[in-house]
Amino acid sequence: MTIPNPTTAVRVMRAPRVRRASWLFTASVVVLGAVTLAAALAPLVAPYDPDAVDFMAFHGGPSAAHWLGTDSLGRDILSRMIWGARTALLGPLLVVVFSTVVGILLGLLAAWRGGWVDAVLGRIFDLIFAFPALLIGIMAVALFGKGLVAPVIAMSLAYAPFVARLTRSLIAAERTRPYVAAYRVQGFSGSWIALRRVLPNVIPIVGAQSTLNFGYVLAELAGLSFLGLGVQAPTADWGAMINEAQAGIASGHFLPAVVPAIAVVIVVVAVNIIGEELSERIGGGVSA
C-alpha cells in the first residue's frame, strides 16, 4: 500500500486565504520598488556625478537644473540621494540575509536537538538580547574601524537571535505534528525530516517576520552614518548626508538634511507595511 505524502496534505491545509492587497501595501511595494530600481540604475538615472562640486551653486534651491537643490558644496542632492540609496539598501539587505540564515540554522538546531544544546543556545541568545543592536554596531566600529562592513557583521549577529527564537518556537510546534511521526515510521532520518520537510514549512513565516527587520536595520545604519561611524564621506549615503547638512541648518538651509531624513522614514514605513501584510497573510494561512 502506498503511503501518501503527509507534507503535501499539510501544505494544502495551510494554503493561505486569498485576500485583496490593501492600497497601503500596493503603494509600499511601488515605493520600495522605485527606490530599489533607482539604486540599481544609479549610473543611468542620476543627472550628475554625486561627488561633483559646483562652487557657483552652494545651497542652491530647487530648480530646473537641480530638482532638489544643492548642498553646502554645490553637489546635486537628487544625484546623491539616488546613489545613496545603494548603501542605504545594501547594508540592511546584507544584515537581514545573514541574520536570517544564521538564525534559522541555530533555531533549527535548538528545537530539533533540544536538551543541553537548546539550553546553551538559549543562554547565548539571552546574553545578546541584553545589548541593543545599535550599541553592538558602535562597539564593532570601535574595534574594527569605521565603514559599512563592521556594522553589518555586528548587526547580523545582533539580529540572528530574534530569528532563531522564532524559528525554534515554530519548529518545536512542527515536531509534534502527525506528518513528522509518519516520516519517522517510514525510516527517514531526523536530519532529513528537519531539513527537507519541517524547515520548508516554517521558512515563509520566518521570512515574512525578517522583512520587518529590514526597516529597523536601515534606520540604525543610517543613525551610525549620521554619527560619523558608518559610511564615510564623500560616499553618498542618506545618514551621512544628514550629518553633512547639520552646519547648514543653523543658517536656514534645511533641504539637504530634510530630503534624506524623509527618504529614510518613507522606506522604513513602506518596509514595515509590507512585512506586516506578509505576516498577516502567512499567519492566516497557517492557522487555517
Image (tube, helix red, strand yellow):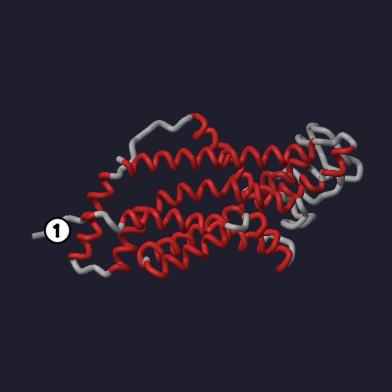
Point out residue 33 in the picture as x, y percentages from the top left corner.
Answer: 56, 42
Q: Residues within 10 Å of mark 1 (few under 14, many from 20)?
A: few
Image quadrant holding the C terminus, namely top left
Pick the residue in front: 255 or 126: 126
The answer to which of 30 and 99 lies nearer the viewer is 99
In screen coordinates, is 209 left or right of 247? left
Toward the viewer: 65 or 234?
A: 234
143 in relation to 87, above or below: below
Question: In the rendered view, does 80 fall on the left or right side of 88?
Answer: right
Q: Residue furthest top?
A: 23
Left or right of residue 102: residue 180:
left
Place of residue 266 in the rendered image (x, y in percent of width and height, measured from the top left)? 63, 37
Residue drawn at x 42%, y 39% is: 280
Image: 233 above or below 118: above
In terms of image quadrants, where is residue 66?
top right
**Residue 38 coordinates in the image, percent (x, y):** 63, 44
Where's the N terminus, which quadrant?
bottom left
Identify the residue at horizontal 36%, vertical 67% (top origin): 113
- Give the amino acid at mark 1: Ile
Above/below status of 42 relative to 189 = above
Of residue 5 and residue 236, the one placed in the foreground of this image is 5
Q: Residue at x 73, y 65 (%)?
A: 142
Q: Quadrant of residue 106?
A: bottom left
Q: Position of residue 210 (x, y in %)?
A: 50, 50
In the image, residue 27 sits, relative to residue 155, either above or below, namely above
Mark 1 lies on residue: 3
Q: Secondary structure at mark 1?
A: loop
